[in-house]
Amino acid sequence: MSLLRNDSPSEETVDPTSKAVAEADELLHRARFGTLCTASLREEGWPFGSIVPYTVDSSGRPLVLLAGIAEHTRNLLAEPRVSLLVHERADDGDVQSRGRLTIMARAARLDESQTTEARARYLARVPQAVTYFETHDFEFYALEPHRLRYIGGFGKIHWLPVDRYRDRYQMDLLAASAPPILSHMNQDHSEALRLIVRAFRSIDAARAIMSSLDRWGFMVRTEQPDALLRFDFDSPADSSSIRGIMVDLTKRARASTRA
């Protein structure tokens, strides 16, 4: 990912750990689901794997939406130490030549104050989950990373320091430079934001306000109806690419509404 003013360091100056952390972070955002491994409550001592969609919050924690009756939910409530495995697709069948990441973590249920943003982030990646919120059985859990194991291919094997992973989110340069971008979008491109919301979320809002921005996407708060929405980028953005990304998104939204 480029730094501000496009002054990204060369390959020679990036240490292997920083490069591996960046690759692991990108893999976590590219993948849409993973294998959640919990300690079986029913069969003590045995691991239990489940396929789960997930999203990622602003501090780098995977967020999963789990049903209270699910086996894995019962397991992690009894033993919160879990792991999440995500991996790249391998259309040629050679899965071991592709990147994969295991996050060893502690699972904790989100409190009510955190669920609005979690829902927005989750629905951006898993839109079909909107029906899950019609029941009271589903709740969000955050997976707080303890250790990370990243394999980027043959010979690229790393135990990643969790503090370096967290630092990547705390030092998100696009998020740090967001205030003037948010002001510009909300003052000069408010109609474009309404168009994006209408085209991609089928919400004809009276007002749309970009409320936050980071390298992986942005949040929009709408009025009439009131909603908080998340829009994810296909790849990480920086200060030199964000304008082009927003212009392209607006063009796609305009073309979609004309179709």
Image (tube, rainbow, N blue to C red):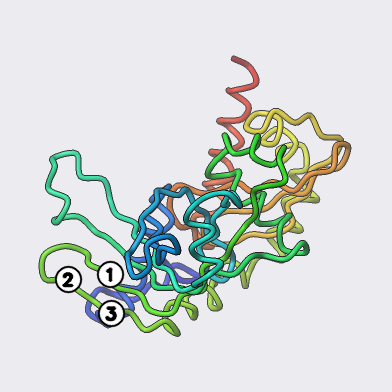
- Residue type, label 2: Lys
Q: Position of residue 156 (x, y in %)?
A: 17, 71
Instruction: Please state if 229 lies on the left or on the right of 108 as rendered.
Output: right
The residue indicated by pointer 3 is 159
How far apart in space, not on screen, are marks 2 and 3 (Cα)?
A: 10 Å
How far apart in space, not on screen, are marks 3 and 1 (Cα)?
A: 6 Å
Q: Position of residue 129 (x, y in %)?
A: 59, 39
- Residue type, label 1: Tyr
Q: Quadrant of residue 205?
A: top right
Viewer-proximal residue among 205 and 191: 205
The residue indicated by pointer 2 is 156
Instruction: Please state if 181 lies on the left or on the right of 245 as rendered.
Output: right
Q: Does the residue at mark 1 contact the one at mark 2 (Cβ under 8 Å)? A: yes
Instruction: Please state if 246 lies on the left or on the right of 97 as rendered.
Output: right
Task: Let me know if residue 23 appears in the view.
Answer: no
Q: Nearer the viewer, mark 1 or mark 2?
A: 1
Badge 2 density bin: few <14, some 14–19, many ≥20, Cα 10 Å: few
Q: Say the numbered circle drawn on residue 150.
A: 1
Q: Quadrant of residue 191?
A: top right
Mark 2 lies on a secondary structure that is loop
Q: Position of residue 253 (x, y in %)?
A: 61, 30
